[in-house]
Amino acid sequence: MKEVISHLLLLAAFAVVFSSLTACTNTANSQKGPVDDSVPPVVPADGEVVKKKSEYPPIASAVATAEIKNLDGTAFTVNDKKGKVILLNLWATWCGPCRAEMPALVRLQDRHGAQGFEVLGLNTDDEEVEKINSFAASMKLNYPLAWADTGLQSSLLKISKFPGIPQSFLLDREGNLRGVFRGANQADIAKMEETVAKVMAESQ
């Protein structure tokens, strides 16, 4: 019996260590959850897909119209970015998994930026401009950074149902939600890259 208990404790310890490598926690976030392949199309009771301009839902209006503050003090909304494929990424400088994910975000921006794709890094902690700029330089980030206030964070967390960072939300050129990605393990990152490539290919 002692041997069984010790094995169970060892497995629990491994699980804790592994989860700490895939997502960060603070007052706004918790453990990692699964990755959504993509947001499913709307299907009524009779099984037929609803005929409309897009099979995918528009991003919640609270997200689309929220004022997002740039580091230089200017502001924009997600609606202002319509016409681009956007990846909203929640992150913070202290989050190890966020840092681990960033080279993939840089690759995505390099690969698709000229075709109208943009990563938007939304800082969740209202960290100081100097700290964010220094961090961005050290990580060689090639995409814009801004702040997500508590209202915007809350609206995004209602969509993902995941209280951890990093997490990302992929929007197509019409502002429709095409994917929600939680955590930063290799499977999460691979699925995000695959989905971005798919959405970009549709709009070429």
Image (tube, rainbow, N blue to C red):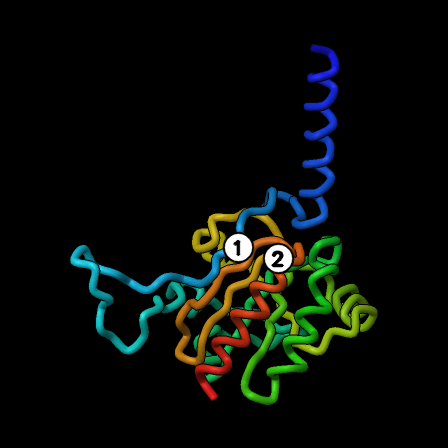
Residue type at the position of mark 1: Val
Residue 107, above or below 132: below
Q: Are marks 2 and 1 in contact (CB under 8 Å)?
A: yes
Q: State which mark lies toward you, 2 or 1.
A: 2
Q: Is residue 128 left or right of residue 180?
A: right
Return the x and y of residue 69 as percentages of the image width and height: 58, 70
Q: Which residue position is annotated with label 2? A: 187
Q: Is residue 51 above or below residue 165?
A: below
Q: Which residue is mark 1?
A: 35
Give the percent coordinates (x, y) of residue 37. Answer: 47, 60
Point out the image quarter for the N terminus.
Answer: top right
Foreground of the two, 191 or 62: 191
Using a 10 Å C-alpha cutoff, classify the residue at mark 2 as few (fewer than 14 neighbours), some (14 to 19) or many (20 or more): few
Answer with the quarter of the image where residue 73 lies. bottom right
> Which quadrant of the view contains residue 92?
bottom right
| Residue 181 percent coordinates (x, y) | 54, 59
